[in-house]
Each structure stands twice: as C-alpha cells, then as structure tokens.
Image: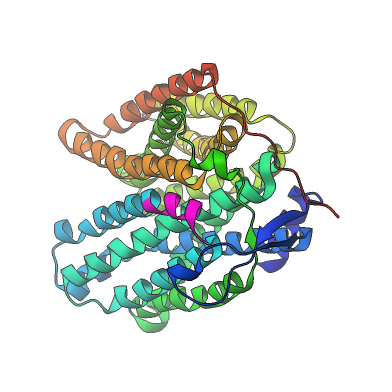
Amino acid sequence: MCPALAWICLCAGETRVWRTRRYPLAFSLGYLSPMPTIQYTRLTAYSSTAVYYLSFIILGLTTAASGPSLLKFAEHTASELEHISLVFVFSSFGYLIGSFLGGRAFDRFSSHRLMFITLTIMAVTCALIPAARSLAVLLFAMLFNGLSAGILDVGCNTLLLWIHGKRAGPFLNGLHFFFGIGSLVAPLVFAQALLWTGDIYWLYWFFAIVCVPIMIWLWFLPEPKHGVADEVRKAPFSLLPVVVMAILFFLYVGLELGFGNWIYTYAFTLNLETDITAARLTSAFWGSFTFGRLLGIWISTCLRSKTILFMDIVGCAISIAIMVLWKDSSLALRVGTVGLGFSIASVFPTFLMLAGERMQVTGTVTGWFLVGSGAGSMLLPWLIGQLFVATGPQTMTTVLSITLAGMSLAFLFFLRMRTHPPPEPVPNVE
C-alpha cells in the first residue's frame, strides 16, 4: 500500500515548502498551543498526505464493517434486529457531533495531536465493540466510534487543503479513493475473520491494531501551517455560502448512501436479480465508485472543479434515467448502477475543492460541511426505507431523482453567489 501512497502523492503534487508549528510532546490541552515555526519540506508534506490516506483507509474499514457485522452484534447482545439497527443511528449521531466539534478544535489546537487522540478513541472503541455483551455498551461504543470518525474526516480534509492550497484537488480525490479502498477491503476481512475464527472479534481487533502505527507516525510529524490567517479565521464568516455547501453535501451523501444501501433490496424485490447477483450488483456499484475516485485524481489536474461537477451531475442524471425508463430490465439496472457509481465518485472531494477556491475554508467551516453530510447519511436512506415499505420499490428511484434535481439547483445557486476567494498561501522557500 505504501508504494501506492507514494505514487499518488508524487503524481498529484509539486515542490512546495511550508512553514509549520512544532508542538511539545507533553500530552495535555495545556500543551496544544503553537510554538515557533519550522521548515515544512516537500518530503514532510507528502509524508503528512500519506498518513492522512492511511487514516482514511481505517475510516473506510470501520464504516463498511458495521453492515456485515449486524447479525453478530445481535447475537452478542441477544437483541432483536429492529433494536440492533440502532447502531447506525448512534454511529451517525456520533459522527455529527464529531464533525461539529472537530471543526472548531482543528482551528484552535494542534491538528496532529487531535488526530492522535481521535485514533486512540477509535482503537479503544474497535477493541470494545465485538466484546460488548449488552446493547447499551455496544451503542455507547458505536457513538464514540462515530465521533472519532467525524473528527478524523474533518481533520484529513481540512489539513490537505491547508498543506496543498488551491492545488489540493488531486490530493483530495486521492484521500477519498483510499476511503473506497477501505470500504472494499472491509467485507473481505470480515469474511476471513468468520472463516478463521467463526466470529468478528479479530475483525475489529485488527482495526484497533492497525491504528497504532499511524498514531505513532502522527505524533512525530510536524504541524502544517494553518491555511487561513489568524485574523481571517477569528473573523465571522459569511453564513449563506456555508449553508448552501452544507446542503450540497447533505444531498450528495444522501444520494450516494441511499442508492448504495438500498440497491440490493430494490433489485431483489423487483425480481431483477437473485440474492447472489444482487450482492454482486452492490459490489459493482462500490467498485465503479472506487475506480471513479482513482480516475478523479488525474481528471482534477486537467479540469476545473465546476466543469468536473457539471460532468458528474450529467452522468448521474443519465444513469438514473436509464434505470427509470427501463425499470423492468436487469441489463438497464446494471448499466445504470455502474454509471451512477462512476459518475458520483468524485463529487464529494470536488465539492470540497470548489469551496476552497471560492471561500475561506477553516476547520469550523469544514465541520459544518460534514455535519450536512452526516445528516444526509442518516435521513435520506431512512426516508427511502420508509417509502419503500409504504409505496413500493420504485420509490427509490423517485427519491434519488428528486435529490439529484435539488443538488443540481443548489450547485447552480452556489456558483451564482458572491463569495470571497481565499488568497493562495505563500510558500516559505529558502
């Protein structure tokens, strides 16, 4: 994995040298205030980028493992399935809290120390989750696991923008590509854990162990210089662009997870696929999604962010239209699924890049963006489920079409808004 990280960092980057702030090793909030700056070399920038990528692999692993583990959670805690599904609610709620608090924390404290603490919480909760023997303990662990995921998500995205500035597009696409890698690998690790041990203990304990070397690496990395000047960061920010961008993230994540979580049930209920081929269809969606993010690394070096987003939205519209117009065709469903996964893949990192081009992006602002995405991950898949039961499977494509239309209108509105583009950080080259 490390050669792949190095390749992506080197292909996407250029020689940039930044000032950073070094923090003492004492581990308390009192020692999180900055000390004098030091030279931040290209090697250090790529090393920081690589550790963020590894952190996102862990984020993808822990996020994607919850679904396959659901029946084992129910068995461990002697809970009914309708009760054990609360793990998703508590995890998403923790993510919302982590996104909200993490954004402010990264504006005020040592970023790498915060990520160290966050990964420590994630490792502890991963060790606790499979050992929980009551639903209350499991939900408590999932809440804090989601909280750590929210902080980690805010941190990695924000720090990449600070390090690479307006050239962060390829690096952001690379970051979310590695989340996709973690999401793809998690079911494979789950299957091997069941094959070797018959349970999920070592699945989550493996996640906890993997956190340790990344924590150590983060501890000794120097801090990236804050991407926004102190006087700008402390000044009140324009609320409307932040709200519109948060709505865009809400609609996008709802579209992504609404389809990804329900395509299996949709295809199987309509007798378009068997249980086996429906599972493969789900894998095809996430596979095309991951490939799209890999390709997005290169595309983001060639095209402007708003051009990429226009292309993505058109691709999503065509893919959904294929599934709606030929709703009884298994082939149309497969083509639409792969097309949607590929088209939607680069939207999230490109939204972040567009925001970085048109407004001052602090940790607090990024936190609000991810609060929107967290709300979308909870509400829209839940809404599809409610309407799916009440009115039938075709509701899924209707909700997805309305969501895509809303996202398109919000995107056009954001482009027409008056925003204040941030100045490009000036490298400290000696």
**Residue 21: % across, % down:** 64, 61
Any magenta on residue 104?
yes
**Residue 151: % across, % down:** 43, 56
Q: Which residue is located at x 76 percent, y 48 percent?
A: 427
Q: Which residue is located at x 64 percent, y 57 percent?
A: 224
Toward the viewer: 327 or 102?
A: 102
**Residue 340: % across, % down:** 50, 35
Residue interval drawn in magenta: 101-109
Toward the viewer: 75 or 160?
A: 160
> Can see residue 273?
no
Toward the viewer: 25 or 230?
A: 230
> Can see residue 84?
yes
Any magenta on residue 51?
no
Q: Quadrant of residue 208?
A: bottom left
Q: Residue furthest bottom?
A: 197
Q: Quadrant of residue 139?
A: bottom left
Coloring applied to the structure: rainbow
**Above or below 210: residue 366:** above
Q: Which residue is located at x 19 percent, y 61 percent?
A: 84
